[in-house]
Amino acid sequence: MPGPPQGPSEYTRMMAAASIPGTGGPAAPASPGFPHMPQMPQANMPAVPQAHVPQMPGMAQPAIPRPPAPQFAAPQPPPASALSNKLLLGILGLLMFLVGGLVVFLLTRH
C-alpha cells in the first residue's frame, strides 16, 4: 500500500505554474457579468515529439503504400426526354384536378 503523497500534487503544481507570469498561457480577461467567478487558467499542452528511428547504412526505408484517392464524378443532368416526361405528367395531373373540381361543382349544383 503506497504511503502518503510526498510534495505538492500535480494539480497544485499546475495551478502554481499558471499563476506565475510568463509560464502559463495568456490570462483571459475577467467577465464583466460575473465578477465573483474566477477565470479558469488556460492549460498549454506540450507538443508530441516525433519518433526518430535511426537508419542503418545500406538499408532503404520501406515505402508505405497509399491507396489511390477516390474519384468522384460530377452529377449529370437528366436527359431532356426525362424532363419533358415529368412536365407532361405535371400538366396532365393539373388538368385532371381541374376536371374533377368541375365535375364536383356540377354535381353539387343540381
Image (cartoon, helix red, strand yellow):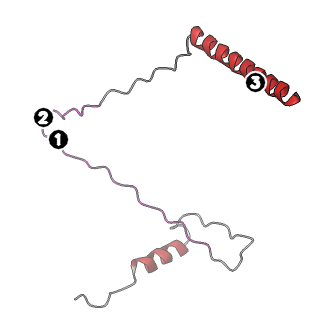
Outermost residue to the front: 110
Asked if the magenta segment contains residue 54, the reply would be: yes
- Depicted 79 relative to depicted 2: above or below: above
The span from disc 2 to disc 3 (Cα, nearest Å) is 85 Å
Instruction: Between label 2 and label 3, give the one nearer the viewer.
Output: 3
Check the image and name the residue furthest to the right: 109
| The N terminus sits in image quarter | bottom left
Which quadrant does the C terminus fall into?
top right
- Is 63 above or below relative to 32? above
| In front of the other: 97 or 106 | 106
Establish if 90 lies above or below 104. Answer: above
Q: Residue at x 88, y 28 (%)?
A: 109
Look at label 1 and name its amino acid: Gln
Mark 1 neighbour density, 10 Å: few (under 14) some (14–19) many (20 or more): few
Residues packed near mark 3 inside 10 Å, few (<14), some (14 to 19) or many (20 plus): few
Across and down, in percent, residue 67 comes to 30, 30
Q: Is 33 situated left or right of 86 in this image?
A: right
Residue that numbered label 2 is attached to = 59
Q: Residue 21 in the image: x percent, y percent?
A: 56, 70
Identify the residue under disc 3: 100
Which x, y percent locates residue 98? 78, 22
User: Taken as a whole, is the magenta stretch helix, strand or loop?
Assistant: loop
Q: Where residue 84 appears, x then y in whole percent?
A: 63, 11
As shown in the figure, which amino acid type bears the numbered disc 3? Gly
Q: Secondary structure at mark 3?
A: helix
Q: Which residues are magenta?
A: 39-66
- SS of the residue at dot 2? loop
Instruction: Judge the density around disc 2: few (<14), some (14-19), many (≥20) Cα neighbours within 10 Å.
Output: few
- 10 part of magenta stretch: no
- Report which residue position mark 1 lands on: 55
